[in-house]
Amino acid sequence: MTSPHPLGARVMALIDDLSRHTDGPGLTRLYLSPAHKATAGAVLGLMRAAGLDARLDALGTVVGRWDSTTPSAKTLFIGSHLDSVVDAGRYDGPLGVIAGLVAIETLRREGAALPFAVELLAFGDEENVRFPTNLSTSQGVAGRYQTAWLDGKDAQGVTLREALVAFGGDPEGIAGLARKPEDTLGYLEIHIEQGPLLEAENLPVGIVSGIAGITRGRCRVTGEAGHAGTVPMAMRRDALAAAAEMIGAVERIGATRTDTVATVGVCEARPGASNVIPAEAIFTLDARSPDDVVRNAMVEGILAECGAIAAKRGVGFTFEPFMDSPATPMDAGFQSVLAEAAQSLQIPPRYLASGAGHDAIAMSAIGPAAMLFVRCKDGVSHNPAESITEADADAAVRVLVEAVKLLGRRHAG
Ligand code: HGY
Ligand code: MN
Ligand code: MN
């Protein structure tokens, strides 16, 4: 029996198939991992089967190009990411890649002749979970790759450079990835909302007005190891107990405003034995706001509080930032294209902000960028329970198809 939502059905089936590729636990697909390699290979095959000129670029991004018959045509980029967080949901990232693929398949099947080329991009390092990076693969396309990222190490001490070469990438080829603004028409990305608003308003899709700014870094607390049984409490310099007080401060300060969030997602104690007072505690800080002044003030407040706690407890405290991603408005013109496309399908355009970071931040450096959010169940994401419906996937693909046709009409001749 054919689905009433054939495009959505294809999107869901292809995403289900991709979710076989994981390094565990659950669905875990970190940048340059074996699961990333397998997923990139599968997407490469899908792009080629769709008739795109497809390849893996020097940073592991899967690139599929549909050239235009118009000489010196600009390029419209469509994309999202294949990498995931740990024990992730299956739609965060792959939805944008596969919905983009199905939209391109549909346009080509309909014989669309566009006055611009289209490139489908499947990025590999949007989550920045394995290495201390910031959207490194899309920054490579935007010509803003930071070579220091190559020396960053993962939890096993493997550098990004080593992992990239083992993956089949090419550190020497990174500079050549940069696309020029003058050759770029813009960038469109479909992504799950990762929030509850579209579901609350019973809308299948929404248009992203802007993306929050993000500070991310590593906090290190240094105390003194000691015997858990013999050192009196008042004589300890317990790094983990100090970190616990600091983590409480992160939560308290992050909660003081409705336009800020602050999270500690990772915390480890060293040497990590039950009868040893921790000598060192390392935890991550992720602090966000749609307003960079507010975000920076919050980070300053958090670090000052951590410093005061460290002084009170006689422990050391350092903060090593590795991400300072500015709040990024989406392009008004491209937002209006998505809005007009949605309206042509009788979907009222709903604008909403993104608290999550996306590759669109990087791509906005070379041209107008806009995103279409898709309703997700209970707003849950970064969680295996992440889920969307076939009907909403279908609506998203159809909005994207209409948006590309609209851009085609606007840029014809
Ligand atoms: O963390 C984020 O905002 C995104 O999921 N990378
Ligand atoms: Mn994402
Ligand atoms: Mn994510």
Image (cartoon, rainbow, N blue to C red):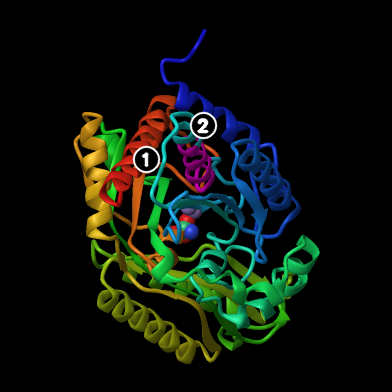
Mark 1: secondary structure: helix
Q: Nearer the viewer, residue 271 or 209?
A: 209
Residue at 47% x, 42% y is: 100
Main secondary structure of the magenta stretch:
helix
Residue at 26% x, 71% y is: 291
Name the disc covering residue 11, or none.
2
Residue at 52% x, 62% y is: 265
- Alpha carbon separation for disc pair 1 and 2: 13 Å
Residue type (three-letter) at the residue carrying disc 1: Leu
- Above or below residue 270? Residue 352 is above
Residue 412 coordinates in the image, percent (x, y): 30, 49
- Above or below residue 323? Residue 169 is above
Give the quadrant of residue 31: bottom right
Is residue 409 visible to the viewer in this orientation of the structure? yes
Residue segment shown in magenta:
91-104
Mark 1: few/some/many CA within 10 Å (<14, 14-19, 20+): many
Q: Nearer the viewer, mark 1 or mark 2?
A: 1
- View extreme (top): residue: 1
Name the residue beneath numbered marker 1. 400
Residue type (three-letter) at the residue carrying disc 2: Val
Give the quadrant of residue 123: bottom right
348 relative position to 396: left or right: left
Q: Earlier in the sequence, mark 1 or mark 2?
A: 2
Residue 254 coordinates in the image, percent (x, y): 33, 68
Mark 2: few/some/many CA within 10 Å (<14, 14-19, 20+): many
106 relative position to 255: left or right: right
Q: Is residue 97 magenta?
A: yes
Residue 251 coordinates in the image, percent (x, y): 38, 66
Residue 228 coordinates in the image, percent (x, y): 70, 75
